[in-house]
Image (cartoon, rainbow, N blue to C red):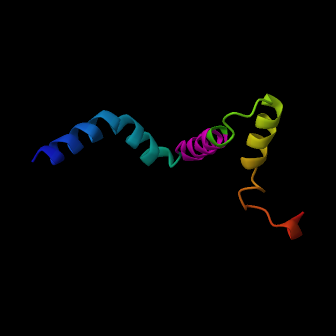
Amino acid sequence: MPEVRQLAVTVDRWWPEIEAFIDTGHSNAKSEGINRVIKLVARNAFGFRNADDQRLRTQCVTTRRARGHLRTAQL
């Protein structure tokens, strides 16, 4: 089956990264998630001309508090 063959090729190609995750338990998922949010904010702000506001908006969106990790009562 071509799908199984393609899966085997993909796993073989990514095996060093898969093995590193299995050995260490660490991945780059958090940084990839933050990069996705930054790109989404940039797309939403397309057409705005103030680069400083864009930077501040990105910084606000990617902070832990904005993502719901902290409650106001904890501050």
Q: Position of residue 73 (x, y in %)?
A: 88, 70
Task: Where is residue 63? Give x, y as percent.
Answer: 76, 49
Find residue 46 and report its image quarter: top right
User: Which residue is most to the left?
Assistant: 1
**x, y percent for residue 57:** 77, 42
Question: Tag count in the figure?
Answer: 0
Q: Is residue 73 above or below residue 15?
A: below
* Residue, far front: 47
* Residue furthest bottom as drawn: 73
In depth, the one of 33 and 11 nearer the eye is: 33
Most foreground residue, 8 or 62? 62
Residue at horizontal 73 percent and vertical 41 percent from the top: 58
Report the magenta residues as a range.
Answer: 27-41
Name the side, left or right, on which 16 lies relative to 34: left
* Res 2 → quadrant: top left
Query: In the image, 45: left or right of 5?
Result: right
Q: Is 38 a magenta residue?
A: yes
The secondary structure making up most of the magenta span is: helix
Q: Quadrant of the C terminus?
A: bottom right
Q: Residue at x 44, y 40 (%)?
A: 20
Q: Residue at x 45, y 45 (%)?
A: 21
- Which residue is at 39% across, 42% downward? 18
